[in-house]
Image (cartoon, rainbow, N blue to C red):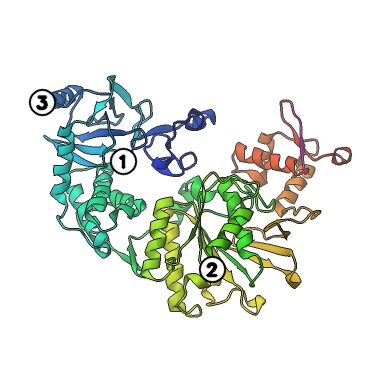
Amino acid sequence: MTCEPRAKKPWGKYSPHGCDSATSHPEVALRPYTDNEEANYGIGCEKTNLTVVDCDHGLADESALLDWMLKHDIPQTLIVRSGRDGEAGFHLYYSGAEPTGSFELDGVTGELKGVGSLVVGPGSIHPSGKPYTIFLDKPIVPLPERIKSARKRKIEAVQPDTVIPEGSRWVHLQRTAGQLRNVGLSEDGIYAALKDFAVHHCEKGETYPDEKVRELAVWAASDKCDGGPTGIVTVGKLTTTPKGYSMTAEEWMAHDFSAEESESLVGTETNAIIRPLTKNLLIAPDKSFKTTFLMRLVAGLAAGKTVFEQLPVRRACRVVYFHAELNPAEVQQRITASVVNIDTEGRFVNVRDIRTHLIDEEGQQFILETMQHYKPDVVILDPWQELIRGYDENAQKDTSLARAFITLLIETFKCTAFLIQHMGNDESKGGRGHSGMKGWRDTLIKLHRPNSGDIVRVTVEPRWGEKVTFDLAFKDGTLTPVFGQPKVKSVQRKNLVAFFKQEYPEGATTKQVAEGEPYQGMTLDAVKKMLQRAVDDGDLVKTETPPVIWSVPTEEESC
C-alpha cells in the first residue's frame, strides 16, 4: 500500500482503506511513482502472512541486536533498520501472521505487527530524512515461540482477567492507554496493545472503531497524557472523545488541511457541490424518485464515474446505503436499475435490516458495526422518518439526538453523509419535521415532479457554492438526462471564457492561466484539468503539439 511521504500513515489518495488497500498488483502499487509523487510504501502484514517484530527501545546498535537474539535463541531472518535518529530501531520479519500486540523481552520493548497492521518497507524515508535500510538479508523464517510468549506476558501485565461490558469499554481503554505510556511504549506500541485489549478483553471488542483506538494512542503518547483518562463527551447514548480543532485565527489560516478533507467528491475545482465530511439533505414529496435519484448518483460515486453531467464525480468512493423503507425485493430492483452501465467494483454496499435506527441504542450499535466492517467514504440514510421511528420528528429533543449521531458517524469514520427526508404538505416550507434540519445540513438537494409525470426537476444548493438545476427523465427504472436539454454552464465556466476573451484572445499556456488573478493559488495540474473540461464541453480549444495553447474557439471552429 502507499504511505504518505516520509511517514507511516497510509496515503488516502492511493490507499483509502488503510491496510485493506494492500495489493499485489504492480500497476496499482507503483501508481504514485508513475504519478511522480514522493511516497513511502507499506507492507500489509496480514495479506503477506507476516509478523514483523518492531524493536522500538532497548537496543543501542546492530551488535546489541545480534547479542540479544543470540542470548534468547531468536533465529536470524530478514532485518531492516529504521531511519530514525537516536536509539536504534529494527524490524525483524517472520512468517505467520499473529495478532498485533506489544512485547517485552529482557529490556527490549516494541510491537508485533501482524493482523491488521503494516510496516514501512526498506527504501522508504523516515520522518528524520534517513532511509529504512536492510541490515541482514536472510530468508524469512517462522516466528519463534520465544517472541510469542514475550507478547502474551506483556499484554497480561496490563489487562484484566474478566470480560469488560460493552458500556464500560471506553473508560478501561483510556486507563490502559495511560498504563502503557507509563511502561515506555511508543504511539504505535500503545495502539497495537489497545487493539489487542479490545479484541481479547472487551465485549464486542473486535468491532470497536479503529479511529477511536488510534486517537487514544496519539493522546497517550503526547505530553497531554499524565497516565489518567481524558474527558468524555456524551452524544445521545454513546460516548466519544472530543474531536475538532481549537486554533487562533492565524493558526486557522496557516493550517494545511489534507486534500481528503478539502477536495470535493462532486463538483469542479471552482464549484464544490458535495464536499467530504459534510451532511447532505435530499428532500422531495412522496413518489418523486428520491431513492432512484440518489442510488444512481452514489452508484456513480462508487464507480468514480459521472452519471449526471451537472454533478461531475471527482473520484471513486466506497459507499454504504442503509435502506429503511423499501422491502428487500424493491431494494434489489433499485440496485439493478441504478448500476446500469456502471462497474462499482464491490464498492457499493446496500443494507436492509430492521435494526437500523438513529436513536435507539441497538440500532445505533448496528450502524456502527456495519460502518466499522465496510469503512465507507459515503453513507446514505434513507429515509429520515423511518430511521427515527417511534420518536417525534417534530421534537427538538428527539431529532437532535439523531442529528448528533449522524455527526458522530461523520467524525468517527471520516465519511460524507446523505440523508433522505420526506417533503411536508407545503413544499415551500421544506422537509417534514423539526426545523433544525435546515440549519444542520450543508448541501440541499430538492426534487420536483410536475403533475406526477416522468420528468423530475433537480435543484442542488451547496451552502458554499453555486446552485445547479437540471431535468431528468424516469426510464427503465432509473433516471436519465432529458434528450436535447441544453448544458447548464456555471458562472465559473462563463468567467473562464470571459477571462480568455479579455486577457488572452490569441490563446495562453497553462502557466499563463495559472498566473491570472482569478486562478492564483490553484496548482498547474488543477488548472490543466479545468481547461481540459472546458475543451471537452466545447468552450475552449487547444493545440495538440507543444507548447499547448488554450484559446476560445473561432466561429468556424464552433461550427
Q: Nearer the viewer, mark 3 or mark 1?
A: 1
Q: Residues within 10 Å of mark 2 (few under 14, many from 20)?
A: some
Q: Residue 280 in the image: x percent, y percent?
A: 55, 62
Cα–Cα gap, marks 3 and 1 = 28 Å
Tell me the CA gap for discs 3 and 2: 65 Å
- Residues 410 and 524: in front is 410
- Residue placed most toward the observer, 310 or 425: 425
Q: Which residues are magenta?
A: 539-544
The residue that disc 3 covers is 71
| Nearer to the camera, 380 or 287 | 287
Q: Amino acid at mark 3?
A: Lys
Three-letter amino acid code of the residue under disc 2: Glu
Residue 192 shows up from this direction: yes
- Please name the residue that numbered disc 2 is placed on: 325
Q: Percent from the top left, x then y, of residue 343?
A: 59, 44
Pick the quarter of the image with the C terminus.
Answer: top right
Q: Identify the residue at the far top of this view.
A: 137
Q: Nearer the viewer, mark 1 or mark 2?
A: 2
Residue 244 in view (yes/no): no
- Determine if the magenta segment contains residue 93: no
